[in-house]
Image: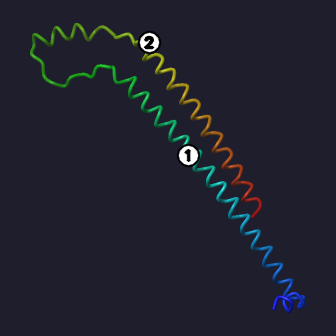
Amino acid sequence: MELLETQDPERRKLLETSDRHKRELEKEVKDMSDKTEKVVKNALIIGGVLAVSYLLVSQLGSGKKKKKLKAKSPALASADEEDDDEPEAPGVFAQIGTKVVDTATLVLLDLAKEALAEFLKNRKQKDGDS
């Protein structure tokens, strides 16, 4: 049966064209899946870094005293007002935490900027090819 298929030149051309289109489609699907995988990895990395940054900030910032909303007796209120007037100096760990958060924010913004620039570049190339 295959002998008959190869003898007919028109059928052979159609089979070759079909194979070529099949290879091109497989290549496009592979390229799309690679790009999608890369975007998902970037999103997971950025999300992980944001989650770690949030945890660090929440752990380092939890040492601050929260204001009480309860009503106080007049004698205690005047004593507490004297203590509240003094500003609390941030501790060494709070300063380190602030620096870490600032640095992490800058790194994340830089990564997001690069990812967005690459995405827009790829999209522009894709639109130009169409």
Q: How many neighbours does mark 2 have within 10 angstroms: few (below 14), some (14-19), or many (20 or more)?
A: few
Residue at image point 67% right, 59% down: 32
> Left or right of 61: which side holds 41?
right
- If you read the primary sequence from the N terminus, does the residue marked by circle 2 or circle 1 appear first? 1
The quarter in which the C terminus is drawn is bottom right
Give the colour scheme of this rendering: rainbow
Label 2 secondary element:
helix
Q: Specify the quadrant of the image occupied by residue 78.
A: top left
Q: Specify the quadrant of the image occupied by residue 89.
A: top left
Please state the horizontal and vertical placement of residue 44, each as a whole percent of the image.
54, 45
At label 1, the amino acid type is Ala
Residue under label 1 = 43
Which is nearer the eye, 30 or 113? Answer: 30
Label 1 secondary element:
helix
Please state the horizontal and vertical placement of residue 108, each as a whole percent of the image.
57, 34
Q: Specify the quadrant of the image occupied by residue 115.
A: top right
Please state the horizontal and vertical placement of residue 125, each as a whole percent of the image.
75, 55
The answer to whether 62 is drawn above or below residue 112 in the figure is: above
Which is nearer the eye, 49 or 65? Answer: 49
Residue at image point 80% right, 73% down: 20
> Left or right of 75: which side holds 28?
right
Residue at image point 30% right, 8% down: 86
Residue at image point 58% right, 35% down: 109
Question: Which disc number belongs to residue 92?
Answer: 2
> Left or right of 41: which side holds 25?
right
The answer to whether 124 is drawn above or below residue 73 in the figure is: below
At label 2, the amino acid type is Val
Question: Which disc number belongs to residue 14?
Answer: none
Q: How many neighbours does mark 1 have within 10 angstroms: few (below 14), some (14-19), or many (20 or more)?
A: some
The answer to whether 71 is drawn above or below residue 4 in the figure is: above
The Cα–Cα distance between marks 2 and 1, rounded to whole angstroms, is 33 Å
The quarter in which the N terminus is drawn is bottom right
